[in-house]
C-alpha cells in the first residue's frame, strides 16, 4: 500500500457528516395493531413489551429475559465417549448409515430437547369511552425509544407513552388527557397459566407464579421450577382509584402513571434458579427506588441513558420524501417492487434499536431467537440461543454499529457456558477445554440437542468469534486478558484434543456436519449429514487458531502452546473448489440433497471471517459462484439467510446485488412492524440485515479501512456518522453522485490508520482522541 504524507491530515474539529433526522426515525401507523406481529417493541435489555396501541382494549405483552421453562441438567449422553472411536471409524470408512445409528443411540442428548423461553404476561388497560375514537396515530420513535399512541374523543386528545428505562429498570406507561378530558379505565395483569394476580388498595397489582413443567422424557424432568413475580404500581392524577377484582378501576383521572417491573429466581452466576432469591422482594426494591419519581423524571433519566447509546450512529440516503406515509404502507410498496431508501435507513436504525433493547444492562442474557420479545409459552424453536449461525448473527452489527456494550453481555454468557461446556468436552469427547453444540438454554445445556443435525462440536469454537471481534474493534487488552482470551484458549484446548488424523493425512474434525444440510452418499444416493471436516469446520478451526496465536502474542503468554497450534494448522485440510466451480461444502465433492439450502456455512470464510478475500482470487470467484448456485435453486428463502446474502455480496464488492437482496429481505421476509420473518418471527434477520447495510458502507477485515466498498447505484447520495472500524476508528462520511464529499476519522486508541477508497490507498499515524479530515486524501493532493 502506497504511503502518502500530507499536512492536510491534522487533528481538527469537524462538524459531523450528518445528524439523525428525527422525523425519519419513526415507525408509525394510523390504526392499532391487529395482531402481535403489528405491535411495537420496547425494551431495556432485561424487560421487554409489545405495545398494541389499542384505544379501547390496550394490551402490553410483557417479557422478562430469564423466564424460562426447564431446569439445570447435564444432558451429555453418557454413552458418547465409549462409542466415540466406533463413530469416528464408521465415518472414516464411509459407513455413514452405521455412523448415524451410533450417533442416534449414543450421542444425542439425554434429554434431547430443551424447554421454552416464556412470556411474563399481559398488562391490560380497558378504556371506557362514551364516544367513538378519532384522529388515531401510533408510533415508535427510535430517537427516544418511546412507543406512543394518540387519539381524540369528543375533541379532547389522549396520549399513551410507553418506554423501558434501563436506569429505573422498569416498564413505564403514562396515560394523559388534554384539557377537560378524563380517563376511565380498569388496569390489570394476566398470565395464561402458572400465576396468580392480586390487586391492592394502595394501587399495586402483584402477579406471582412458578413455572410447572409437565414430565417429558424429551425435554427433562417435570415439576415446579422457576419462580417469577411482576409488580405494577399505579398512580392516578386526579379522579378515584379502587380495587375491582384482580385489577384497579380508575375514574375521572386526568393522567395515570404505571410503573412495572418483574423478576425471577434465576442466577446467571449459577446458570440455575436460586432459592435464596425472592422475586417479589427484587420487584419491590426496584420500584421503591423509583417511588416519588414523576413521568418527567423517569423520562429524562431514560432519554439521557438511551440517547447516549443510540445517537452514536446515524445514516441517511438523502431526503426521505415518504416519511409522511405510514410504515406498513411503505412496506407494502416495497413488496410490490418499489424502491424506498428511506425505509432502508429506518430498517437500519431499527436494527440498532432492537439490539440495544434486547441486549444491554440491566440485562444479563444475550438476545435470543426473538431478541427479548415472545408471546408463546412454547415458542418457535423455544426462542432459544441457536449457536449454528443465529446467535452469532444477532451480534454481527454490535461492533461496526457502535453498540459494543451489547456484545459484552454475550461475552459474559459464553464465558459462563465454558463451565458446563468443559463437562461436555470431557464426557463426550475425552478432550480438555470446552465446547457446545447447536443450541443452548440459560441453564447451560451444552450437549447434543434434537437429532443427528445437532452433532456440531465446533459450534463452541464458532461462538468465540464475536468475543475476539470485540477486542479487534476496541483494542481493550484488559477485556482480552480477562474475558476473551480464556474462552478462546479453552476452545483451542478442546480442538487439540478433538482433532484426529484422517486417512488422507490431515488433522480433521470427526464427527462433523455442515449445519442442518445433507449430501447424498455416493453409490446409494441416500441422504446423510455426518462427515469429517466439513468446510465450515476447516474455516472455524483455522480462525480460532489464528485468533489464539494473535492474542497470545498481544498478551505475551502461552507461546509454547501457540507454537503447537501453528504446527497443527499446517496439517489442516485446505478449503477446496468443486468441479462446478463452487466452494466445496463437505470433505469430498458430494451431491447436495438441497442445492438451495438456507444454510451457507461453507461461506463462513467470506463473511463474517476474512479468509476469502480478493487476496485469494480463486476462492473469491468460487464464493460468488456458490452464492449464485444457492440462489438459482431457491436459496435465501428465510429472513436470516437472505440477510447473510446481503453481507456476502458486500464482501464481494457487489453493491447492486447486495442492494437487491435488501429489497428482497424487506419485500419477502419482513412483517408490518419491521420484524424479520423466518417465518415466523425470528430476530436474527433484522440484525444480519443491519450488519449488511453497514458492511456495504465500511469494511475493515483485511487490515485496512475501506470506504464505500459496495456502494450500490441506488444510493447515489447519503451520509453516515459513527460507524466503527477495527482498530478503534470511528468514521463519519458523506457522498454525492456516488463520490465521497467529506470524511472524518476519529481515533480512539491512536496508532496506524490504513485507508482504501477505490484505487486510492493511504496510511498515516494517529493519536488517541484525534480527529482527521480526509479531504486531502479524497482530492488526491
Image (spheres, grey):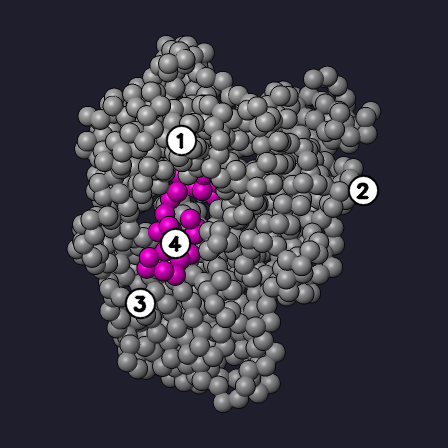
Query: Looking at the rendering, which quadrant does residue 551 occupy?
Result: top left
Label 1 crowd bin: few (<14), some (14–19), many (20+), radius 10 Å: few
Q: Name the residue under label 1.
A: 524
Q: Name the residue under label 3.
A: 191
Labels 3, 4: front one: 4
Q: From the viewer's perspective, tell me whether residue 51 is left or right of residue 219.
A: right
Q: Distance between the residues labelled 3 and 2?
A: 55 Å
Q: Mark 2 points at which residue?
A: 737
In the foreground, 597 or 364: 597
Q: Identify the residue shown where x is 18% and y is 33%.
A: 78
Q: In which quarter of the image is the N terminus?
A: top right
Q: How far apart are marks 3 and 4 (CA)?
A: 19 Å
Secondary structure under tag 4 reads: helix
Secondary structure under tag 3 reads: loop
Q: Mark 4 points at which residue?
A: 380
Labels 3, 1: front one: 1
> Which numbered disc flags the more N-terminal residue, 2 or 4?
4
Q: Quadrant of the C terminus?
A: top right
Q: Distance between the residues labelled 1 and 2?
A: 57 Å
Label 4 crowd bin: few (<14), some (14–19), many (20+), radius 10 Å: some
Q: From the viewer's perspective, tell me whether residue 712 is left or right of residue 368.
A: right
Q: Identify the residue shown where x is 19% and y is 25%.
A: 82
> Which numbered disc flags the more N-terminal residue, 3 or 1?
3
Q: Is there CB contact under 8 Å for labels 2 and 4?
A: no
Amino acid at each position: 500500500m502506497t504511503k502518502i504524507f500530507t499536512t492536510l491530515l491534522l487533528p481538527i474539529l469537524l462538524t459531523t457528516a450528518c445528524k439523525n433526522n428525527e422525523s425519519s426515525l419513526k415507525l408509525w401507523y394510523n390504526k392499532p395493531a391487529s395482531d402481535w406481529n403489528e405491535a411495537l417493541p420496547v425494551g431495556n435489555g432485561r424487560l421487554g413489551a409489545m405495545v398494541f396501541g389499542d384505544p379501547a382494549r390496550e394490551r402490553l405483552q410483557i417479557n422478562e429475559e430469564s423466564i424460562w421453562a426447564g431446569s439445570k441438567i447435564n444432558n451429555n449422553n453418557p454413552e458418547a465417549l465409549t462409542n466415540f472411536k466406533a463413530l469416528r471409524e464408521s465415518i472414516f470408512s464411509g459407513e455413514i448409515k452405521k455412523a448415524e445409528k451410533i450417533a442416534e443411540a449414543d450421542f444425542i442428548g439425554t434429554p434431547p430437547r430443551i424447554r421454552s423461553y416464556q412470556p411474563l404476561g399481559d398488562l391490560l388497560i380497558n378504556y371506557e369511552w362514551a364516544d367513538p375514537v378519532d384522529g388515531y396515530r401510533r408510533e415508535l420513535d427510535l430517537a427516544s425509544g418511546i412507543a406512543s399512541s394518540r387519539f381524540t374523543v369528543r375533541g379532547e386528545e389522549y396520549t399513551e407513552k410507553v418506554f423501558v428505562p434501563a436506569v429505573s429498570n422498569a416498564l413505564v406507561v403514562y396515560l394523559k388527557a388534554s384539557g377537560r378530558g378524563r380517563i376511565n379505565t380498569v388496569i390489570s395483569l394476566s398470565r395464561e397459566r402458572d400465576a396468580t394476580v392480586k390487586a391492592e388498595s394502595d394501587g399495586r397489582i402483584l402477579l406471582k407464579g412458578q413455572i410447572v413443567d409437565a414430565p417429558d422424557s424429551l425435554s427433562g424432568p417435570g415439576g415446579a421450577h422457576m419462580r417469577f413475580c411482576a409488580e405494577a404500581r399505579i398512580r392516578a392524577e386526579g379522579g378515584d382509584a379502587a380495587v375491582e377484582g384482580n385489577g384497579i378501576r380508575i375514574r375521572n383521572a386526568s393522567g395515570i402513571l404505571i410503573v412495572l417491573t418483574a423478576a425471577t429466581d434465576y442466577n446467571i452466576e449459577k446458570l440455575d434458579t436460586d432459592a435464596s432469591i425472592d422475586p417479589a422482594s427484587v420487584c419491590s426494591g426496584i420500584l421503591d427506588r423509583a417511588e416519588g419519581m414523576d413521568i418527567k423524571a423517569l423520562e429524562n433519566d431514560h432519554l439521557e441513558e438511551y440517547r447516549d447509546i443510540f445517537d452514536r450512529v446515524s445514516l441517511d440516503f438523502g431526503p426521505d420524501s415518504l416519511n409522511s406515509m405510514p410504515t406498513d404502507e411503505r412496506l407494502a410498496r416495497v413488496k410490490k417492487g418499489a424502491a424506498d431508501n428511506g425505509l432502508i435507513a429506518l430498517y437500519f436504525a431499527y436494527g440498532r434499536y432492537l439490539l440495544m433493547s434486547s441486549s444491554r444492562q440491566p440485562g444479563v442474557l444475550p438476545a435470543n431467537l426473538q431478541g427479548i420479545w415472545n408471546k408463546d409459552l412454547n415458542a418457535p424453536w423455544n426462542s432459544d440461543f441457536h449457536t449454528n449461525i443465529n446467535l452469532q448473527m444477532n451480534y454481527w452489527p454490535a461492533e461496526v454499529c457502535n453498540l459494543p456494550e451489547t456484545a459484552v453481555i454475550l461475552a459474559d454468557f459464553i464465558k459462563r457456558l465454558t463451565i458446563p461446556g468443559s463437562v461436555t468436552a470431557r464426557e463426550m469427547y475425552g478432550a480438555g477445554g470446552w465446547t457446545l453444540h447447536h443450541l443452548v438454554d440459560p441453564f447451560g445445556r451444552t450437549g447434543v440437542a434434537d437429532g443427528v443435525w445437532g452433532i456440531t462440536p465446533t459450534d463452541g469454537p464458532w461462538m468465540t468469534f464475536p468475543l475476539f471481534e470485540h477486542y479487534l474493534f476496541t483494542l481493550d487488552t484488559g477485556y482480552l486478558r480477562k474475558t476473551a482470551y480464556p474462552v478462546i484458549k479453552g476452545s483451542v484446548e478442546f480442538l487439540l484434543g478433538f482433532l484426529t488424523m484422517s486417512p488422507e493425512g490431515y488433522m480433521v474434525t470427526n464427527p462433523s456436519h455442515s449445519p442442518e444440510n445433507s449430501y447424498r452418499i455416493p453409490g446409494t444416493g441416500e441422504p446423510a449429514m455426518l462427515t469429517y471436516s466439513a468446510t465450515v469446520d476447516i474455516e472455524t478451526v483455522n480462525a480460532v487458531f489464528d485468533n489464539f496465536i494473535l492474542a497470545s502474542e498481544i498478551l505475551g503468554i502461552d507461546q509454547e502452546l501457540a507454537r503447537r497450534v501453528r504446527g497443527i494448522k499446517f496439517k489442516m485440510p485446505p478449503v477446496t473448489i468443486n468441479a462446478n466451480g463452487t466452494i466445496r461444502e463437505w470433505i469430498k465433492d458430494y451431491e447436495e440433497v438441497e442445492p438451495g439450502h438456507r444454510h451457507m456455512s461453507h461461506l463462513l470464510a467470506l463473511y463474517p471471517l476474512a479468509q476469502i478475500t480478493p487476496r485469494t482470487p480463486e476462492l473469491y470467484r468460487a464464493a460468488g459462484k456458490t452464492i449464485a448456485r444457492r440462489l438459482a435453486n431457491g436459496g435465501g428463502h428465510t429472513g436470516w439467510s437472505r440477510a447473510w446474502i446481503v453481507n456476502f455480496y458486500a464482501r464481494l464488492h457487489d453493491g447492486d446485488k447486495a442492494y437487491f437482496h435488501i429489497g428482497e429481505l424487506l419485500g419477502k421476509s419482513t412483517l408490518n412492524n419491521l420484524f424479520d420473518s423466518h417465518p415466523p418471527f425470528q430476530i436474527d434477520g433484522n440484525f444480519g440485515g443491519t450488519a449488511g447495510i453497514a458492511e456495504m458502507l465500511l469494511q475493515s477485515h483485511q487490515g485496512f479501512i475501506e470506504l464505500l466498498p459496495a456502494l450500490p447505484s441506488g444510493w447515489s447520495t447519503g451520509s453516515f456518522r459513527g460507524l466503527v472500524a477495527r482498530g478503534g476508528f470511528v468514521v463519519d462520511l458523506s457522498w454525492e453522485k456516488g463520490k465521497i464529499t467529506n470524511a472524518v476519522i476519529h481515533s480512539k486508541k491512536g496508532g496506524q490508520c490504513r485507508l482504501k477508497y477505490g484505487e486510492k490507498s493511504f496510511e498515516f499515524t494517529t493519536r488517541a482522541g484525534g480527529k482527521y479530515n480526509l479531504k486531502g486524501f479524497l482530492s488526491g493532493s
